[in-house]
Amino acid sequence: MSSIVFHQVSRSFDRGRNRVAALAAVSLAVAEREFVAVVGPSGCGKTTLLRMAAGLDQPTSGTVEVGGRQVRGPGPERAVVFQQFALFPWKTVRQNIEFGLKCIGRPAGERKATVERYLVLMGLEGRGAAYPHELSGGMQQRVALARSYAVDPAVLLMDEPFGALDAQTRIVMQEELVRISRLSPRTVLFVTHSVDEAVYLADRVVVMTSRPGGIREIIDVATVRNADGWHRFNMEDVMDRDAFVHLRTHAWKLLRDPAYRAATPIPEYLAS
């Protein structure tokens, strides 16, 4: 099992003499092989939620479980993909992908076969001997994804993985992630600031409230996508479809609702 379950999770941080609540009693279940995207205002705790699933942070109260076991630290069944590519600049593409396999003790023959498989799957054929600085941003993120997939994790935790890419490359990578997810499905928790990206990629979209973060609404995308059949189209065509526009607009209204946004005082120089 590779489900992710947050049960009444809260997280607070000390800021000097103050205690700041980042998350408040969040409960969420991500089913096995489900793709769930999380959107919300900056500072609402999206990344904190993902870090707790990764075991890189611990809740102040509540529990996080992966595969029925409470998360107490990082584990090989979970792979994290960050916005920054985090590749080893002194290693080749092939060596970067192989790194995790070495860490978990896979034999040389198996490592070689796995690396070759993911070079093909990620469209990196012929680039195995290249170094990260010789690759475009999109290619570097393909390597980061290949490295994560290569260790065969049950769960992928992705924190704005395409946020550093230009708009055109970002769309290409979104389409590639859809393709790869169909070929090699995983349980995915995906944090993004892009509503379009969330609706295009995810089975469900979790819309969070402002700090302290909670769940405002969970939007069921998969049912609409399957009924409308937009999984057969690339992103540019999907974005024009009525079903997609309806879901995107609904998510944006949740994010833009004045009652939903945090009350932020207007600076004096703007108010005058």
Image: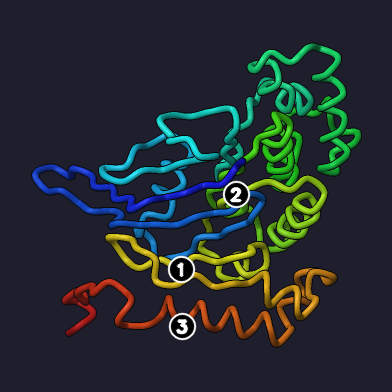
User: Where in the figure is residue 21, as x and y percent of width and height?
Assistant: 23, 53
Residue under pointer 1: 207
In which quadrant will I find the C terminus? bottom left
- Mark 2 lies on a secondary structure that is loop
Q: Are marks 1 and 2 in contact (CB under 8 Å)?
A: no
In the picture provided, is 38 more to the left or to the right than 12? right
CA–CA distance between discs 1 and 3? 11 Å
Q: Which picture quadrant has residue 105?
A: top right
Looking at marks 1 and 3 on the same chain, the residue that comes earlier in the sequence is marked by: 1
User: Where in the figure is residue 1, as x and y percent of width and height?
Assistant: 61, 41
CA–CA distance between discs 2 and 3? 25 Å
Amino acid bearing label 1: Val
Furthest-right residue in this view? 126
Amino acid bearing label 3: Lys
Residue under pointer 3: 253
Q: Are marks 1 and 3 in contact (CB under 8 Å)?
A: no
**Residue situated in front as seen by the camera: 104 or 258:** 104
**Rendered view: 75 above or below 42:** above
In the picture provided, is 244 more to the left or to the right than 70? right
At label 2, counting other C-alpha atoms closer than 10 Å, the crowd grade (few under 14, some 14-19, many 20 or more) is many
Q: Between tags 1 and 3, which lies in front?
A: 1
Q: Which mark is residue 12?
A: none
Residue under pointer 2: 161
Amino acid bearing label 2: Pro
- The residue shown at (76%, 58%) is 172
- The residue shown at (76%, 59%) is 175
Looking at marks 2 and 3 on the same chain, the residue that comes earlier in the sequence is marked by: 2
CA–CA distance between discs 1 and 2? 18 Å
**Label total for image:** 3
- The residue shown at (68%, 74%) is 223
User: Where in the figure is residue 67, as x and y percent of width and height?
Assistant: 55, 39
- Mark 1 lies on a secondary structure that is strand
